[in-house]
Amino acid sequence: MSAQGPGTFPYMNDTFVDDIKAARRGDLDAFGRLILAHQDRVRAFLGARLRDHHQVDDLSQECFIIAFNKLEQYRDDASFSAWLRSIAHNLLRNYWRQRKEQYVDIRDEILEDVQDVDTDFLQDHIQHLRDCMQQLPKRSQQLLHARYADEKSIADLCKHYETKHSAMTMNLHRIRHQIKKCIESKGLEA
């Protein structure tokens, strides 16, 4: 680390200072070094918030493109990593906003498709589901009813049944798995 003084970058070593200055003048090699130095942090930030690693790649790349195009807006006295992270954060917010809009569109399509469902087939599936649920222990039936019919939160269920969150979610998972196996044993898809 270099000594800090007037006009220095407090968050970066001299290599980043020189590379930022050079990148501002259009030096792509200098910006490439900045990418190499910071891409793991940007990817980790996005990867912690997204499951799709392809989307992490896309948003990381877009983050650096935006950074290059807006390099003149970077304040020399700020952390370059934090600046990149703020760009990534904004990209992530836009990504989720677009996904939410797509989700609404998909729901409309599903509602249209539901009108075409064979009601006899659906009634058979519902009856098999009821049969499988009745085979569960009474406590499991009550838990499912509270969670899905009464729409109780996991936290509320934990308080009511005096159990930990992880135990409650595992219990619900096991109950759903039992129902799935029962439905599949009847020759249906769960």
Image: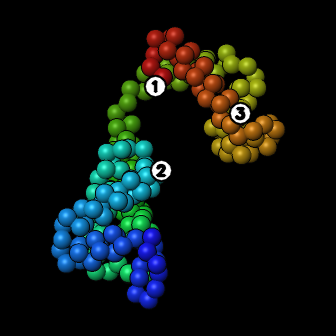
Q: Amino acid at mark 2?
A: Ala
Q: How many tags in the picture? A: 3
Mark 3: secondary structure: helix
Q: Amino acid at mark 3?
A: Ala
Q: CA distance from mark 2 to mark 1?
A: 39 Å
Measured in 3D between alpha carbons, the distance from the residue under mark 3 to the one under mark 1, in whole angstroms, is: 33 Å
Q: Nearer the viewer, residue 166 or 53?
A: 53
Q: Quadrant of residue 95?
A: bottom left
Q: Which residue is mark 3?
A: 167
Relative vertical location of residue 5 with respect to residue 124 in this rendering, above or below: below
* Label annotation for residue 161: none
The residue sitting at the bottom extreme is: 6
Looking at the rendering, in which quadrant would you find the N terminus? bottom left
Q: CA distance from mark 2 to mark 3?
A: 24 Å
Can you give x and y, in whole percent of width and height, for residue 153 in the image? 67, 45
Q: Earlier in the sequence, mark 2 or mark 1?
A: 2
In the rendered image, residue 36, in percent from the top left (x then y), is placed at 31, 57
- The residue where tag 1 is placed is 122
Q: Nearer the viewer, mark 2 or mark 3?
A: 2
Marks 3,1: beta carbons within 8 A: no
Seen from the viewer's position, the closer of residues 126 and 23 is 23
* Circle number at residue 48: 2
Name the residue: 73% across, 30% down. Answer: 142
Does residue 113 sit above or below 45 in this rendering? above
Residue 46, by quadrant, is bottom left
